Amino acid sequence: MNSNSKILLGHGSGGKLSHELISDIFLKYFNNEILGAQTDSAVLDIPGRHLSFTTDSYVVDPIFFQGGNIGKLAVCGTINDIAVSGAKPLYLSCGFIIEEGFALTDLETIAKTMAEEAKNAGVKIVTGDTKIVNKGKCDKIFINTAGIGVLAPEKKDISFGANIKPGDKIIVNGSIGDHGIAILAARESLSFQTDVQSDCASLNDLIQSCLASSENIKFMRDATRGGIATVLCELAENKNLGVIIEENEVPLKDLVKGTCEVFGFDPLYLANEGKVVMVAGAQDAGLILQKMRSHPLGQDARIIGEITKGHPTKVLMHTEIGGRRIIDMLAGEMLPRIC
Amino acid sequence: MKYIDEYRNKGLVIKIADRIKKISTRKVNLMEVCGGHTMSIQKFGIPYLLPATVNLLSGPGCPVCVSSRKFIDHAVALSRLPNVVIATFGDLIRVPGSTSTLDKEKAAGADIRIVYSIMEAINFAIKLPEKKIIFLGIGFETTAPTSAAGIAYADKENIGNFFFLSSHKIMPPAMSALIDEGVKIDGYIGPGHVSTITGSGMYEDIAGKFNLGVVISGFEPVDLLQSIYMLVDQIENNRQEVAIQYKRFVKPEGNTKAKQLLEDVFELKDDWWRGLGILPKSGLQLREKYARFDATKNFEVEIEKTIEPKGCICGEILKGLKTPKDCKLFAKACSPQNPIGACMVSSEGSCHAFYKYNRG
């Protein structure tokens, strides 16, 4: 990064530029052994207790979309970040930055959704903050949430994927890319309509039920910005192992597939807000799949691939026609402000 | 999904691939000249299915890649003017100019908006009467008619704050120039979308003059493999002809309405192509009667001196003389997040497609 570079939208994509920003600035100055692990949630070893702690900010545009709004996203997103660490989420904070002139009725709608979502997920919003800025100084409303969950000691390794080995299976709880397409459709500038609903949902119940059924879940990530491709690329690189996925096994709605064809998007990179990528020992993969499918948020769950010893750090895909290609980290932005 | 799944049927794909293997005895270089083909071939992993005798080359089919840096420099200069909004396809935003990109200008405060069509840009002009909207027109015969339709609409509606900067080009001069330059090609996979507009007649010259087959192909795996089969079959039997594989869209006469619109709005000019230099009558500029929309005639800006990047072999890659893997910069100094050559930026560029799908 040279001294006259500026922040580009691509720095927020969750892809390569984001990684550079994190390592060149934030890790450089903030680094410690907990942050350095770069997990979705920080795992805190406080005497007598293991805690998961995380924070996320939400700037989605537009703030209302098919299947949710910015408030629902702010609650689900943070709950999911905690849940994928293997912890049970308990408490949330929320901070609002609101633009002068914002409609109170909209704020109420958002707050109501947040309350409902938190209640459904069994989580309490216990502290908060509000800041109002001059018109034009932020776009309508931005929300930050932070969350805390408790982690059973035997689940401590999940965040780090410490026990992953070749032959482990990769499971996804349902169709990918729905959130990305729902946001795209809700943007005024694009005159296209679709019935695709955002998959925005709290995954803690689904994840807890899977964890209860198997002790062989070795790693989880919620595939938000950058999609499942980014999750898999990071996994392969961090673990120095290979990943192979089968395109035909990746669940994808026809509507999402069609929209991707028209706009030239790759669904593997599209954002999700209710999808977990799980790595599990092969012996339990069938059982976990069954458990997922019995849950309302996992009916279309599939085993999409596995961890390999070959081609370490690389993610390969057998294409639907029997060809083979590499899956790379997203460079630059595909769609800004999707969460 | 209808119209997609049939053309991605694994059984059918493997059957055609086997047939190609069966008939192919000579070593052949087949070139596609369409960014959509480049992408499909890499995305579906098609080279993996072909026999060693069939080599696929990627030609100058990506409009962003063949355009001069001067075009970007011009757009950058325009973006710095007060009250100007640049409306552009997303592909152009990160293409390096000599010293800047539209992306960087946007971060520095320029009003640059990504659109999916010229009509979106015209709507900005209607909504923002105090601004001057400049649309960057780029692409071959496929996208040029939509630009022409936009200009005709802006003319009819008398929209005074809409302008157009053209980098539109036409494909046949480049296809001929490549052979003139002695690039070793045994057959062309003809561009499907371009041909939907132009028809197949314009390739007769190539087949006749240069003894080279042209098969106009669709974009799905079955389309591409069938086209490759048809070309290999022609070569093995010493035939050279123009054939249409993409019959569900391409008619021999093309789209006459679109052709008429192109003729009405644009005239041919000599134009510069990366790797090929200036080709006579290969670019499209607005006719005099539409001069009031022409950004080159309505804004005075100083365009910086064009600097082409050192070490970049985009030109030779576009001619099929080299592959991205031959480039010293590829995947090292030049990558999608830090592109040096245009071929690395556009999702349709050879280097980008290679980087993304084929480094395994």
Image (tube, rainbow, N blue to C red):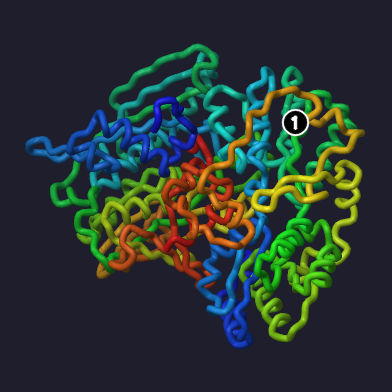
Q: Is residue B70 above or below residue B184?
A: above
The chain carrying label 1 is B
| B213 sits left or right of B289 in the view | left
Query: In what quadrant of the picture does the N terminus of chain B appear?
Result: bottom right
In the picture of the structure, the residue carrying the numbered disc 1 is: B123
Q: Within the image, what quadrant is residue B350 found in?
A: bottom right
Question: SS at mark 1?
Answer: helix
B98 and B50: which one is in front?
B98
Residue lying at the far left in this picture: please name it. Answer: A47
Give the quarter of the image for residue B95: top right
- Front residue of this view, candidates B37 and A189: B37
In the displayed structure image, the side of residue B209 where residue A229 appears, left or right: left
- The percent position of residue A28, horizontal first and vertical second, equals 26, 32
* Residue A331 appears in view: yes
Give left or right: position of A232 versus B291. left
Q: Residues within 10 Å of mark 1 (few under 14, many from 20)?
A: some
Q: Residue at x 65, y 69 (%)?
A: B184
- Residue B52, position as x, y percentages in the image: 53, 78
Residue B124 vertical position relative to residue A117 in the rendered view, above or below:
above
- x, y (%) of residue A170? 34, 61
- Mark 1: amino acid: Asn
